[in-house]
Amino acid sequence: MRKIILSSLLIIVLCACAKNDNYTAPVFPIEKELKGACLSSDLLFSYAYDMCVDNDFIYVLALADNKWVQVYDKHTGEHLGAFVGQGQGPGEVSVGESMTLERTDRCLSVYDQAQRRLVTYRISKDGIPMLSFEKDMNLINLEGAVRNVWPLKNSYLVNGQLGEQDGTPKRFQLWNEKEIVATYNKFPVEAREQQLTFLSPKVCFSPSLDKMATGILYGGILEIFQLSDKSISLEGIHKFYEPKVSLGTGNINPDSGMKYGFSSMCATDDLIYTVLVGDEDPNKLNHISVFDWEGNAMIKYCTEQLVFKLACMEEEEGKLYALTFEPAKGFSLYLYNVQ
């Protein structure tokens, strides 16, 4: 009997060890301090949802004076204009959720979560930038919820609940404006409350749009996907911090001791730049953690500023544009050289 009890205890211990080993904080072989150059300070908005950059401008999705897109000179930080009015009319956005820049065609798309439509603008430059309404794609008639939409080469990646509703959470669908051509609805966790933390992940794409990385804020799990216009395939899962959460009244609540994960990310074809909190305090945003597309931890930079959003360009190797935040000063634009 004693042998049975000891054997049972050994199995429990081994299982517990295996579970703990599932989550391992990333170890960066290089850690260094990173100084940044302030391009512009005291930006006049209270919250920012997204940012991106091209050869000339920095675009910030943030509502100010009833305009959703704020445009800045990427070299001087000068505010050059505000575009995309708040509203429900043609070319207007009610609630902006994300922003996608297509540099080759010089188009900027904003997903309006309230109206379930992707609104696209043409970028023109004649001394100062101009955004002119090009088209919108209405998803209001699609069955299910649409949390976010990103244009790919010849299709769209939808974060939502498209298709037949069976009560189970759904994650990603590829949609070609006529039908769903591929889905990915698996989760790296089994508990329902933990699965819900994956429904609003931080997302970034390689410039070639054939790779996608996602990271959750509640806990820290990095997933890497291979993309085409007809398929979504998982390439790797990297578990850093367990999503220890419980469900409140319509909310996800972190349990005591949970460490927060990813609050922002952007990517080149070689590297994924992230703001990985790694702390029980969600406001510890003063690290930029770099991974390769196999999920290997490469380098961690410690910044003096709290980094709120990140953007980069493949052609500008080693340059990161950041939206930073200080409680006393508000938002600022910074340039970091990470070479």
Image (tube, rainbow, N blue to C red):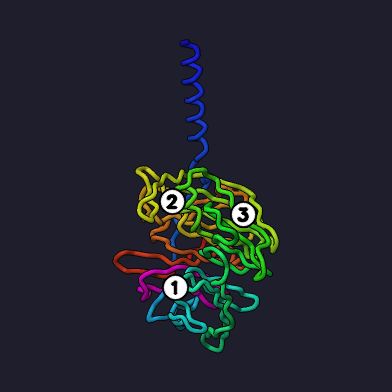
Question: Which residue has dot 1 on it?
Answer: 95
Number of residue marks = 3
Which of label 1 and label 2 is nearer to you?
1
| Residue bounds of the magenta highlight | 40-62
Residue corresponding to mark 2 = 218
What is the distance, in whole Å, between disc 1 and disc 3 at their CAs? Answer: 26 Å
Identify the residue position indicated by label 3 in the image.
184
Packing grade of label 2 (10 A; few <14, some 14-19, many >=20) is: many
Name the kind of residue labelled 2 in the image.
Answer: Tyr
Secondary structure category for the residue under label 2: loop
Percent from the top left, x then y, of residue 187? 55, 48
Dominant SS of magenta comes to strand
Say few, some or many: other residues with alpha carbon within 10 Å of mark 3 (under 14 / 14 to 19 / 20 or more): some
Q: Position of residue 33 (x, y in %)?
A: 44, 54
Left or right position of 183 against 249 = right
Judged from this view, the residue extending furthest toward the bottom is 126
Point out the image quarter for the C terminus: bottom right
**Which image quarter: residue 317?**
bottom right
- Does 89 appear above or below 213? below
| Residue 50 lies in the magenta stretch | yes
- Disc 3 vs disc 2: which is toward the camera? 3
Q: Is residue 209 magenta?
A: no
Query: Does the image show residue 212?
Result: yes
Give SS at disc 3.
strand
**Which circle's residue, 1 or 3, is located before the other in the chain?**
1
Is disc 1 in contact with disc 3, using a CB cutoff of under 8 Å?
no
* Residue 45 x, y percent position in the rendering: 37, 74
Q: Residue at x 51, y 84 (%)?
A: 90
User: What residue is drawn where x is 45% and y is 48%?
Assistant: 193
Which numbered disc, 1 or 2, marks the residue that appears first in the sequence?
1
Does residue 213 sit above or below 62 in this rendering? above
